[in-house]
Amino acid sequence: MDPRLKPRLAGLSGAEAARRLREEGPNSLPAAKRPGIARLVIEVLREPMFLLLCAASGIYLLIGDVIEALVLAASILVVIGITVAQKRKTERALEALRDLSSPRALVVRDGRQSRVAGADVVRGDVLILSEGDRVAADAQLLAANDLMVDESLLTGESLPAEKRLPGEGVPLQAGKVFSGTLVVKGHGYAEVAATGPHTELGRIGRALREIEPERTTLERETARVVKLVAVFAVGLSVLAALLYMALRSGWVESVLSGLTLAMAIIPEEFPVVLTVFLALGAWRIARHGVLTRRMPAIEMLGASTVLCVDKTGTLTENRMAVKEVFVGDAWVGLASDSPLSRGAREVLSHAALASELAPFDPMENAVLAAASRHSPEAAQWRAAWRLDRDYSLSETFLAVCHAWRNTEGRAVVAVKGAPETVIAACGIDATGSEALRAQAGRAAERGMRVLGVASAEWSERAWPADPRAFAFRWLGFIALADPLRPSVPAAVAECRDAGIRVIMITGDHRGTALAIAREAGIGTEGGALTGAELETLADADLARAVRSVDVFARVLPEQKLRLVAALKSAGEVVAMTGDGVNDAPALRAAHIGVAMGNRGTDVAREAASLVLLRDEFGAIVETVRLGRRIYDNVRNAMCYLIAVHVPIAGLAFLPLVMGGPIMLYPVHVVFLEFVIDPACSVVFEAEAGEREAMRRPPRDPREPLFSGAMLALSFALGATVLLAIVLLYGWALSDARSGEEVRSLGFAAIVFGNLALIFANRSRSQSILATLARPNPMLWWMTIATFAALTLTLYVPPVAAVFRFAPLGAGEVGLALAGGTAGILWSEAWKLRKTGDRPRFGTRR
C-alpha cells in the first residue's frame, strides 16, 4: 500500500460526518410514501363491518330516529379512530424494522474502524470493502487487493468486474464502486463520492417511489376467509330479515335484525390479529436483538427442532487472544510481558504477515495484537513492505498465504492456517508430521484454536498460481482461545428442555470443537464428524449420521448446505446460523436462516430470515421463546374470536324463533366490538409467555392454525356460553319481565360471557386461576373499562334509552354474571383435571 494514502485512509472525523449528514441528508433511496390518514380511513370503510354499520345508521336516519343514527355514526368514528391508530402503530413498528434492516457499512472515522448504518454514510467517508459486503455508496477506490464486484444490478453483466486503481491502461470506471453492488472477492478501501439519490442506484430508485408493498400470504388468506364468511353472513341475514317479516311484520325491524346478524357473524378481526401480532411480534423480537426479515419465520420459530450454530462468536465471546506459541518442541505462554525467544517472535511475526491488511476476523486481530506486543518488528514490516500477492483460503488449501516485497525488493512469503495444511506444505516427513499433529491435538483438547505458521523465500520474478509451489520452512504453532459465553450452558439446557437439539458446526479442530461442546452442554456422545469424513458419506448415510452426531468440525461453509439437506431429510425443522457469502445457500435452504448481524456479510443477511443484532446464542434461544409466545397468543386470540362470535350470532337470531323481544340491535354489536377489538389485538398480543412454553416439544409445522381440535373447542366454548345465556333469557321471559328488562339482563350476560371467554382463552392448558399469576396490565384496563361502560348503559337514563335498557338490581346483575360465566366452567374443570394446575403467584418468565 502506498504510504502517501495513509492520511486519506484516516477518514472523516465524527463531527464532520455528522455535519455532512445534516447538510446533505441520509444515504437512502427514495421510499414509497407513507399512507396518509385519509387513505387509511378509506381502507377501513371498505371493510364489511363498517359498510354494515353505515347502512344501519342510514336506515335509522331515514325513519327519523336521529339519536340512534347519531350514536351509530359516533360509534363508526370511534371504531375508525381505533382501527387507524392500530394501523399506524403497526406501520411504526414496520418502519423501525426497516431502519434496522438497512445495509450497514464499515467506515473509518477518527482513524478507527466503525460500523454504521448505511443511511449514515456521508460523502468523504472511507469505506472498508470485504468479500460479501454490499457497497453502501458510490465511491472511488483508494486501495484494492484482488477486488471483484458483481455489478449486474446496474449493468446486467453476469460476470463480476475487476476493480483496480486507475492508471495507465486502466479505465476510469475500473477504479469506481457503486452503491448496491456486491463484493464477491478480495478487499479494499474506497472514498465515498456520492450518496442517496445522487448515486447511480439512486437515480434508478426515483422511479420506484410509488411502489406498493404486497400483502403477506397470511393477510391474503385471512382476507379471503373474511370475505367468504361475509357472503355467508349476508345470505343468512337476508333469511333472518325474511323470517322476521313473516313472524312479526315491520320492514324496518326486519332489516335491522338482518344487519345485526350479519355484523355478529363477520369475523373482521382475523386480518387485524395477524397483521398486528406479526408486526408487533417482529418489533418485540427486535428489542431482544433479533431482526425479522421475513414475517413467516416468526410462525416457524415455535416449530424448530434443531438449532445449527457456529462456535466462534455465537457460543464463544468472539474475543480471541493468542495464549501460547509452539516453537522447537515446547509450548511458550504469552501471559506475561517477558521477552520471547527469537524463534517465538519469528512465529508471531510471520503469522502477522499472513494476516489481512484490514482484518475483520477476530483471530487475525488477536494475532496482530500479540505480534505488536511481543514482536514489534512485525508491525514495522507490514507498514513498510508491499503486499504483492494474496493467496486466499480455499477448499483445497486451508490456509492464508501472503507474498511480500521488502524495502530491498526481496520476496518474503508467510502462511498460516490449518495445522495439517501447513505441515503438508512444509514437506515434513511422516514421523515429524505425526508428532506435530499430536501437539496440535493436545492443545485443541484444551479448547485452543491451533494454527500452523511457516515461511518461504522466492527468487523468481512472477508469483506461482498455487501457494504449494513455495518451499515452506516450518516455524511453529500459535494457539488461541475464545472463552465460552457464561450464558450458553443455561441456554443449551433450556433448548434441551424444549425438545430442541443444538448442533455445533465449526471450522475448528475436532478436539477444540468437542472441548467447547462439552463445556456448553452440547451432546458429545456421538463424537464429532469432520468435513473430510462428511465428504465420504453418501446422502442417505449422512442423513442417518446427523440423527446422533451433534458436533461437526473442520466444516467448510459449502458443506453446511449438505448438512441442512441431511437434517431436513431426517425430518428435522432446521434453524441455521451463518455469516459468510458461502453460508447464503445453507441459510436459504434452512427453514429458518439466521445471519450474524455484527460479523455477517450483507449476502448472508439478505439470504436469512432473521438477523442477530447481537451475535450470541442466547439471542437465538430468546427468539425461539418469543416465537412460541407469538404463535400461542395468535392461536389463543383466534380461539377467542371464534368462540365469542357464536353467542353474539346466536342471540341475534334465536329470539326470532323463541318469540321474545329482540336482544341485539346494531348499537349493541358495536358496544361488543369495543370489547372484542382491543381484546384480540392488544390484550392477547401483550400476554407473557407461558411457563411451559420452553418445556414442551416443538409443534408440528404441518399443524394448521385452525386445526379441527381448536375449532371444535372454540365452537364448544361459544355454544355453552350461548346455552347458558339463552337459559337465562328463557327464565326472564317466563318471569313475565318487560322487553327492556329481558334485554338488559341478556346483554349484561353477553358482556360477562365475553370477558369470561377472554380470561379462559389466555391459555390452552392453564386455568383462569393459574393465569392470574401472569401480569397483563392491558387486560385489567380493558376489564375495568368494560364494566364502566356497561354501568353507563344500564344506569344513565339517556344512554340506557339508546340501548333500550332498564336498570338491573344487584341480584339481577349477579344472575347475569353467573349466566355469562357458567358456560366456561366445564373448560376450566377440564384444564384442572388434566394438569392439576394451581396458581403460582410471582412465577413469571
Image (cartoon, rainbow, N blue to C red):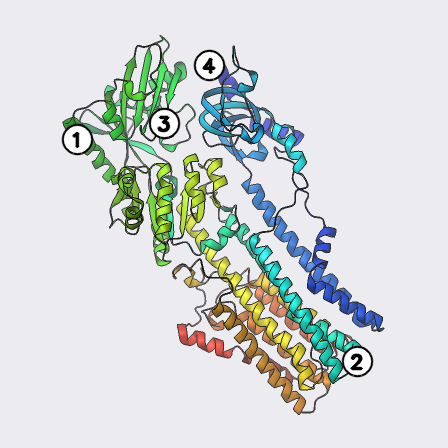
Q: Which label lies toward us, 1 or 3?
A: 1
Q: Residue at x 46, y 51 (%)?
A: 623
Q: Is residue 467 left or right of residue 573?
A: left
Vertical order, 452 against 470 (above or below): below
Q: Earlier in the sequence, mark 2 or mark 4?
A: 4
Residue placed under numbered mark 1 in the picture: 434
Q: Which residue is mark 4?
A: 2
Q: Which mark is residue 250?
A: 2
Q: CA distance from mark 1 to mark 3?
A: 30 Å
Nearer to us in this view, 68 or 798: 68
Quickly name the residue at label 3. Answer: 369
Between discs 1 and 3, the one toward the N terminus: 3
Q: Amino acid at mark 1?
A: Glu
Inspect the image, locate mark 2, and give the three-letter code of the amino acid beneath it.
Gly
Q: Are marks 2 and 4 in contact (CB under 8 Å)?
A: no
User: Please, is residue 324 above or below residue 620 in the view?
Assistant: above
Secondary structure of the residue carrying numbered label 3? helix
Q: CA distance from mark 1 to mark 2?
A: 101 Å
